[in-house]
Image (cartoon, rainbow, N blue to C red):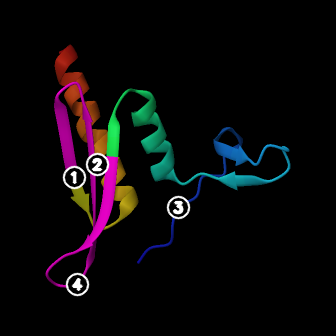
């Protein structure tokens, strides 16, 4: 399984309150935070498929619209979820 992807941008660091300790957020956490801030309710879970491989399932819903995606990796699931929601939003504008 691939190593987690870490973001090391100053704007995405979280401190413990005293300003000294910093923890980088993972990309999927940034996507989840952005979707939540935009009003989406999120859920995700890992499961095993029939061949024993781990799959990730992520879903988001807002205002009666729901998106569910699955992928081999957690980050991929969140990127696909973000992409699906973005495509839907663009289709409303066009």
Label 4, on which residue? 52
Answer whether labels 3 and 2 touch (C-beta < 8 Å): no
Task: Give the structural element (helix, strand or loop) at label 2.
Answer: helix
Residue positioned 22% across, 84% down in the render: 52
* Label 2 sits on residue: 80
Nearer to us in this view, 7 or 50: 50
How far apart, in angstroms, are the residues tagged by discs 2 and 4?
Answer: 22 Å
Measure how far apart labels 4 and 1 are at the Cα level. 19 Å
Tag shown at residue 5: 3
Residue annotated with mark 1: 69
Tag 3's secondary structure? loop
Q: Quadrant location of the C terminus? A: top left
Quarter assignment of residue 83: top left
Residue interval drawn in magenta? 43-68
What's the mark number on residue 41? none
Q: What distance separates the C-alpha of mark 3 from that of mark 1?
A: 20 Å
Mark 2 residue crowding within 10 angstroms, few (<14) / some (14–19) / many (20+): some
Picture quarter with the N terminus: bottom left
Q: Position of residue 73 (x, y in %)?
A: 35, 65
Q: From mark 2 to mark 1, how far is it between C-alphas?
A: 7 Å
Q: Quadrant of residue 40?
A: top left
């Amino acid at each position: 399984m691939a190593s987690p992807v870490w973001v090391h941008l100053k704007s995405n660091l979280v401190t413990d309150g005293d300003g000294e300790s910093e923890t980088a957020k993972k990309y999927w956490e940034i996507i989840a935070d952005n979707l939540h801030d935009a009003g989406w309710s999120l859920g995700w879970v890992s499961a095993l498929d029939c061949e024993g491989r781990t799959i990730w399932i992520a879903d988001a819903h807002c205002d009666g619209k729901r998106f569910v995606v699955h992928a081999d990796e957690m980050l991929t699931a969140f990127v696909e979820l973000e992409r699906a929601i973005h495509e839907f939003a663009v289709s409303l504008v066009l």
